[in-house]
Amino acid sequence: MGSVNLEMPPMEYETRIGKQEVKLNAVKGQMGSKTRGVSLTWNDLWVTVSTRKSGRKAILQGLTGYARPSELLAVMGPSGCGKSTLLDALAGRLDFSTRQSGDILINGHKQKLSYGTCAYLTQDETLLATLTVKEAVYYSAQLQLPNSMKKSEKIQIAEQTIKEMGLQDAMNTRIGGWGTKGISGGEKRRLSICMEILTRPKLLFLDEPTSGLDSAASYYVMSGISRQKEGRTIIASIHQPSAEVFNLFHSLCLLSSGKIVYFGPASAAIQFFARNGFPCPHLQNPSDHFLKTVNKDFDEDIEQGLDGRKPNTEEVIDLLVNSFKLSKEYHEVQNQVAEICQQGGEILEKRSHANFTTQSLVLTRRSSVNMFRDLGYYWMRFATYVGIALGLGSIYYDLGSNYHSIEERGLMVAFVVSFMTFMTVGGFPSFVEDMKVFQRENLNGHYGCCTFVIGNTLSSIPYVLLISFVPGAIAYLLSGFQNGSGHFIYFALVLFTSMMIVESLMMNVAAIVPNFLMGIVIGAGIQGLQILSGGYFQLPSELPNPIWKYPLYYMSFHKYAYQGMFKNEFEGLKFTDDQFGNNRTMSGEDILRERWQVEMAYSKWVDLAILVGTLILYRLVFLLIIKTNEKVVHARKASTSVLSNRSSQIMAKSLPTSPLHGLTSFDDSPTNNG
Ligand SMILES: Nc1ncnc2c1ncn2[C@@H]1O[C@H](COP(=O)(O)OP(=O)(O)OP(=O)(O)O)[C@@H](O)[C@H]1O
């Protein structure tokens, strides 16, 4: 792991960061932020999932809490207690298997968490393995920061953020991934944080930001985050903070089995535990003590119980949960929630980011670099295609123009159109990785679906052209296909378009089927059906009418690729039957009509145009699918922060005596209606 700048004295570090902050504040002004900050409240929040055995299982059980600007709220608890679920619910990211009820408000309003106001660091690291740390952050800065900002300022922000996360020593190291060693797991974690805090979001969710970090790195990362808390609301789930890290937290939400054990000032948690009979042993890290006390997974006896009796952990948790509900801390939480709702606040404005053209260009560049460096994306395929082209050229070497060559030309066209396009599935794993990065960045609002489709399409074109023209030329020249550059260019263009179509098909599959193995099987199956119904392996007149001919034959892009290539190859040629010396000849047009049953009413250019149309259609379908996914996710986000104005008013009115009593109910309604 690259080291955090530990040797730098704290004061010097502070000063340098301080100077950078001045610059950043100027930058923030340019970003047009008018909001003061985000106060987030949740009241009686339930999240349930359905289970086969016991119907619905509650993951979160009636949680109430708040997070305020300039404060760092830590969500702690044993593994599986619901920390990530709480963060997901607050950020509007719960999946469809869950149901949610209760109220979540931003500055006392129902409001969408729009771009730039909220960022979320998930537990999974989805990064482009081929980029260096510096490149990843620079590209991200160019994608996210507004056009009004100078390039030098964007670079400055990127560099400062890299330093804040202690990644300066690993700046030029590649991220690495499957099969290639790169930066360490902890550095990946810090890099992910870097990319989310570039825009200095008002509301920041961090799901286990310190997992994989050693205690010193955890401290520096968390203190870096803590330094940025001014005007920002930060909620971080954390497993086992050291005492130093724990001291950085303003508030603590301690969960066990989806229930609140404690919510309030982090510094007052020790007194709460002591009051209830579980004082923190001398010299023990408070967070270790809390977690040990409420972890029932290993159901060990608690070292010190009530009345000399040793209750089991389940009983201890119940005791603490019930005690908390009656405590002054809980009363204070209710007061705070009601007060924040009453105060209200500004509606958060969407921040501007780089415009569509800039984002498309940056994504195209980033994607090109990734495709160039990822051997599995195109280079392996290129090498394989060259090998296959040499094989094809030597098997069908110098075909000539006798009758025998008619079948051989047909076989070669069929191989090129069926198999060489089929091999495009080889790039699927790399594309799946791209999709994961897109999904994370899109969900966090870095850029939209159109930008991704444009970037991916433009960056792939040169590589697919290379794969079509170089191996295509080898096979074409060795086999002695019809002379003339026009004929070769047509041949290579059909190959290029067909490969792009298969890539688009696989993109559609990747957008629908999340599993990589299933994706390959489904993509290969669809292509198998298209090849079968394309009119080569069974002639069009022999194809069974229902299904195979109507509609599959007309829907298969192979039909147009076969027929275009056949026309390109046979039109204008004459074939001689030189066996037994009877020099009969047959025109290429007759062969097309009689042997291959090609539709001669239109030219080969129409076939190519239909292929281009199919390619555009497939890409548009891909765009539609990811756009629909995006809309569904955003609709969930928009409806997650739900509180009717009516209930907001009731809350406000109920102050000061019984601030929240009886205002919300668990209606077990689906997530998106809150
Ligand atoms: N969609 C779901 N379907 C079924 N169970 C779920 C679902 N989501 C979460 N759970 C369960 O809810 C519990 C809480 O999960 P969650 O991921 O929030 O825990 P966590 O506290 O973040 O755990 P960790 O610290 O290990 O990441 C777990 O027992 C988990 O198995």
Image (cartoon, grey):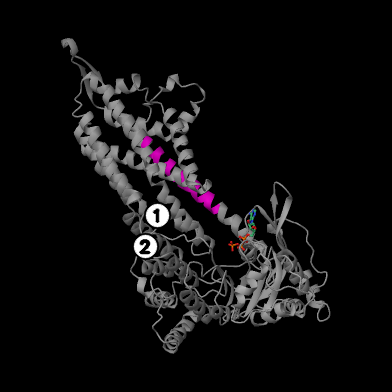
Check the image and name the residue furthest to the left: 581
Q: Is residue 38 on the magenta stretch?
A: no
Check disc 2 and give the amino acid type: Gly
Rate crowding at label 1 as few (under 14), some (14 to 19) or many (20 or more) other CA atoms within 10 Å: few
Q: Position of residue 369 (x, y in %)?
A: 34, 59
Residue at screen point 53% across, 63% down: 123
Along the horizontal axis of the image, is 113 left or right of 399?
Answer: right
- Residue where numbered disc 1 is placed: 178
Position above or below: 450 against 642: above
Closest to the observer, 429 or 305 = 305
Q: Is residue 108 visible?
A: no
**Range of magenta residues:** 607-627
Check the image and name the residue furthest to the front: 308
Along the horizontal axis of the image, is 118 left or right of 537?
Answer: right
Q: Quadrant of ligand 1?
A: bottom right
Q: Position of residue 198 (x, y in %)?
A: 47, 73
Q: Rounded to the nearest whole Å, what is the CA distance between mark 1 and mark 2?
A: 10 Å
Check disc 1 and give the amino acid type: Trp
Closest to the observer, 524 or 555 = 524
Position above or below: 266 against 578: below
Asked which quadrant contains residue 471, the reply is top left
Ligand 1 lies under 8 Å from the Cβ of mark 2 = no
Quadrant where the N terminus sits is: bottom left
Please tell me whether mark 2 sits on a helix, a strand or a loop. loop
Closest to the observer, 503 or 315 = 315
Asked which quadrant contains residue 315, the reply is bottom right
> Residue 182 bears which disc, if any?
2
